[in-house]
Amino acid sequence: MPNRSILPAATSHPGCTWPRLVLVSLSAIFLAAESALTAEPAPAPEAGAVAEAGRPPADPADAARKAELLASSRWRRAVFEFNAWLDAQPVYSPAEVSRIQQELANRVATMSSFELEYLLGTLDEKVKVLESPEARDARSWLGRYLAVMSDAKRADVLRDVPDILDMSTAELEEAIGRVEAKRRDVEQQRAATIAGRQQIGGFLVAAREEEAAERARQAEVRSGPVFSPYRGPPVGDTPFSDAYDSPTVVGVGPWGTFLGIPIGAF
């Protein structure tokens, strides 16, 4: 019956038994493991070869195209105009302006050339909307409107202002339209207030004029001829105006309080 064992027979290798083969195999395994543990680690990949946030390694051709876009006059002009608008606008505080500029730089740093090209087109469109005559007029009025507010009121009005970087051109146009609507409401309220004040002022002026006319009539009456039942012809002064030495006397006598007027003064 033939030997079906897969292990080599001890008699097939003169001078070498099976236990010795096992020992040799185990020694080889241990040596290989030790070599793997003590081997020097593989060198780290070059900078830019590892993807950021799941992004594939940078393509040299794409990196060159991106550098060309960043050096273009179109990109420099768009960034210049955007920063000029940030300096002139009355909505974002200086701290918020710094945050927006830093956020834009961070986004540009991780973009591919095609993403940067799309951002450049969007930035171009935003700047055109922000620098339109309507937007400039709305911006000027909004600055005056916010300037008269207290800090708490201003913060409450601007509490839900969106980030300019995340707004589309359509959303920018809607925001400018809302500012224009607010402006019309404020101007209508101001006109109504001025009209009310003018109406009240007209009433006051009319009342003063009427009062002055009444005083003039009374003065004219007092300056005219006066008739006295105790005198004959009209006299040019009011009755008893010449009786300065005949004051009315009020006293208390044996029969109570009395009122006396010296007759000799007439």
Image: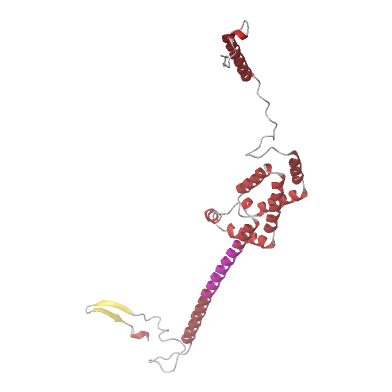
Q: Quadrant of the N terminus?
A: top right
Instruction: Name the residue nearer the viewer: 133 or 8.
Output: 8
The residue positioned farthest toward the front in the image shown: 1
Instruction: Name the residue nearer the viewer: 2 or 115.
Output: 2
Tell me where residue 44 appears, x and y as whole percent.
67, 28
Q: In which quarter of the image is the C terminus?
A: bottom left
- The residue shown at (53%, 72%) is 197
Q: Is residue 121 left or right of residue 222?
A: right
Q: In this view, does 95 lie to the left or right of 59?
A: left
- The residue shown at (49%, 78%) is 207
- The residue shown at (76%, 50%) is 74
- The residue shown at (65%, 43%) is 106
Q: Based on the picture, tell me whether residue 33 belongs to the magenta stretch.
A: no
The residue positioned farthest toward the left in the image shown: 255
The number of numbered discs placed on residues in the rendered structure image is 0
Query: What is the image's colouring?
Result: secondary structure
Q: In which quarter of the image is residue 194?
A: bottom right
Tell me where residue 36 appears, x and y as whole percent.
63, 20
Instruction: Name the residue nearer the viewer: 136 or 190.
Output: 136
Q: In this view, does 207 lie above or below 181?
A: below
Instruction: Name the residue nearer the viewer: 21 or 223.
Output: 21
The residue positioned farthest toward the top in the image shown: 15
The residue positioned farthest toward the bottom in the image shown: 232
Q: Is residue 76 above or below residue 37?
A: below
Q: Quadrant of residue 49?
A: top right
Q: Is residue 47 left or right of residue 256?
A: right
| Part of the protein shown in magenta | 178-199
Q: Based on the picture, tell me whether residue 190 belongs to the magenta stretch.
A: yes
Tell me where residue 93 appears, x and y as whole percent.
60, 50
